[in-house]
Amino acid sequence: MATFAHELAHYLTATCIEEPPGGWDNWEFATDITATFLGFGIFMANSAFNFRQFSEIDSQGWSYSRNGYLTETEHVYALAIFLCLKNIPFDTAAHHLKPSLRKILKKSLKELSKSGCIEELLAIKYVPSAYNKLSQQDAANGASA
């Protein structure tokens, strides 16, 4: 699901005329964050790092895998911002997170609450770019892509 969400975010961000913060070198990171803000944050965080122990006839050991471009903590922090902006309670998300990530989410929400940055984000007003205005005019005049 996380891979699907990441690829969907790629598809949606591929048409952006503005580069992501920090430039196109950060597109993969921005794509992971986009997937979180599309509502897939729990999937993204839960699959960012996986660890397992295995035992076979002739061997035993541990293995791990990493998915995406952000760390688990970065995914959880992006999820915390999303939850704050959408006014979604901690328990709603925490119930679905891996137990090891719940503490990080709680800490992230506490930090965001103290920082005041969510209020700043909520105060931002959308201003369409000239490109969007032209696209809206084309749509109003019946132009199609």
Image (cartoon, grey):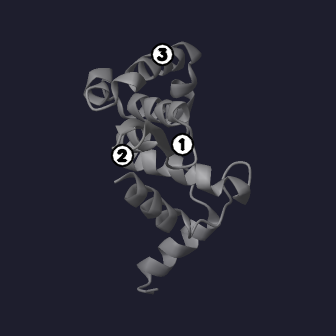
**Residue situated in front as seen by the camera: 102 or 26:** 102
**Residue situated in front as seen by the camera: 82 or 43:** 43
Mark 1 and mark 2: Cα distance apart in space: 21 Å
In the structure shown, which secondary structural element does the residue marked by tag 1 occupy? loop
- x, y (%) of residue 82? 43, 36
What residue is disc 3 on? 107
- Pair 3/1: label in front: 3
Left or right of 68, for residue 96 = left
Mark 3 and mark 2: Cα distance apart in space: 20 Å
The answer to whether the residue labelled 3 contacts the one labelled 1, judged by CB atoms less than 8 Å apart, is no
What residue is disc 2 on? 39
How crowded pointer 2 is (Cα within 10 Å; few <14, some 14-19, many 20+) is rated as: some
In the structure shown, which secondary structural element does the residue marked by tag 3 occupy? helix
Q: Quadrant of residue 142?
A: bottom left
- x, y (%) of residue 37? 44, 45
Give whichever of discs 3 and 2 has the lower sequence position: 2
Q: Which residue does the image show at 71% across and 59% down from the upper left?
A: 24
The answer to whether the residue labelled 3 contacts the one labelled 2, judged by CB atoms less than 8 Å apart, is no
Quarter of the image where the N terminus is located = bottom left
Mark 3 and mark 1: Cα distance apart in space: 28 Å
Residue 49 visible in the shown view: no
What residue is disc 1 on? 125
- Pair 1/2: label in front: 2
Residue type (three-letter) at the residue carrying disc 2: Gly
Residue type (three-letter) at the residue carrying disc 3: Lys
Give whichever of discs 1 and 2 has the lower sequence position: 2
- Pair 3/2: label in front: 3
- The dot on residue 142 is none
Residue type (three-letter) at the residue carrying disc 1: Lys
Q: Which residue extends farthest front? A: 58
- x, y (%) of residue 9? 47, 59
